[in-house]
Image: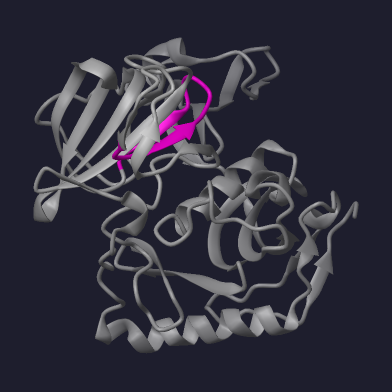
Amino acid sequence: MKSAAAGIHSLQQLRPGKPYSITIDEQNLVNSFTYGIDDSTILKIELVENVFQAQKCAIPYETRLLTIGGFIEGNLISAVGPEKEDYLLALRIADIFGWDIDFNIDLRTGDSFRVIVEGLYLNEEFRRYGKILSVEFINNRQTYAAYLFEYEGKADYYDAEGNSLRKAFLKAPLSFRRISSVYTKKRLHPILRVYRPHHGIDYVAAKGTPVSATADGMVRFAGYKGHYGKLVVIAHANGYETYYGHLSRMGSDIRKGTRVKQGDLIGYVGTTGLSTGPHLHYEMKQGRISVNPLGIKNVSGEPVAAAQKAEFIKQVQALDKMYTAAVFYDAQDTERKKYSLQRTPDADYNALTKTKRQGG
């Protein structure tokens, strides 16, 4: 079995806490071994004609459509729900709207959201969320809508007209954190006790919080630099540069010359350099001149191609029908994962039929 699995998933990589099963024959000899690698994949080793053969297989989840809604009282994480999978769903929603909403400062009490998302079930039990098909988020009385569209193996989110939600720069390099200092021409420095410009934004966050690149680019500097402490500088298109200071450490592959994609991990929040406590100093320049990151005019990505526009509109109409006709269960309702929509093989979702599953 060890030899059969060597080139597929080494048995040296088995980990405590993972599910497994073993079957034996009448002579108490092993016929098969199954091991759960992660949430999506299992390792199967079976005896075939007296020879063990190994393969990786996708876990056969049953996919259901869930409709969930809620209101913001403090932050998005607490609004979506208390479980680990709810936390991950909140992060994904924040990522979808990360170009238009800064979840650190833009949220208001009473903001609301509705999400249409796949639920993945095994043996009638909810295991995790799948694809987010659509999200509606009302922030400060303005409605934002996102629709997933997949074509030729590529997937992205668009508004109802087919415009990409993806922009040149994310509105923030990390999620759900408090801003302690904004961009200003005159600020009392907390350590030096003198008034001086603050050409950036300070995000208060726990030491070790992941920091992401706000746009595609190339690392121009990665190291220790004066009051910045451990610093990463990324050069972007059109002469823009972004600075990420006071890091506790850089990402393992982050060094001068490394190309990064928007959202890539580049380091972790720290308190190196001239700092009173753990936070990220985020700064943006164009042509070496400081600019306010919150005031930058963003450029949108490519819209849905004309050849696929009709198919996209069909999906939007089907999802909009669900927003009109479906019940959106309160995110705080612990029973909500027992209710789902019936789903046809194509995009014509039946928004009118709810099913309460066995055990609900």
Residue 246 position in % (x across, y down): 34, 21
Residue 164 position in % (x across, y down): 34, 70
Q: Give the side of residue 37 with respect to residue 114, left or right.
A: left
Observer able to see residue 103: yes
Q: In the figure, residue 137 lies in which quadrant?
A: bottom right
Residue 5 in the image: above or below residue 240:
above
Residue 257 on the magenta span: no
Most foreground residue, 28 or 309 = 309
Most foreground residue, 165 or 29 = 165
Q: Give the side of residue 13 with respect to residue 218, left or right.
A: right
Range covered by the magenta-colored residues: 198-213
Q: Residue at x 61, y 50 (%)?
A: 129
Q: In the figure, residue 35 lies in which quadrant?
A: top right
Residue 203 in the image: above or below residue 105:
above
Residue 63 position in % (x across, y down): 63, 58
Q: Residue at x 48, y 39 (%)?
A: 57
Protein image colouring: one colour
The C terminus: image quadrant: bottom right
Q: Residue at x 47, y 27 (%)?
A: 209
Q: Give the side of residue 126 with respect to residue 169, left or right.
A: right
Most foreground residue, 110 or 116 = 110
Q: Give the side of residue 67 with respect to residue 259, left or right.
A: right
Observer able to see residue 350: no
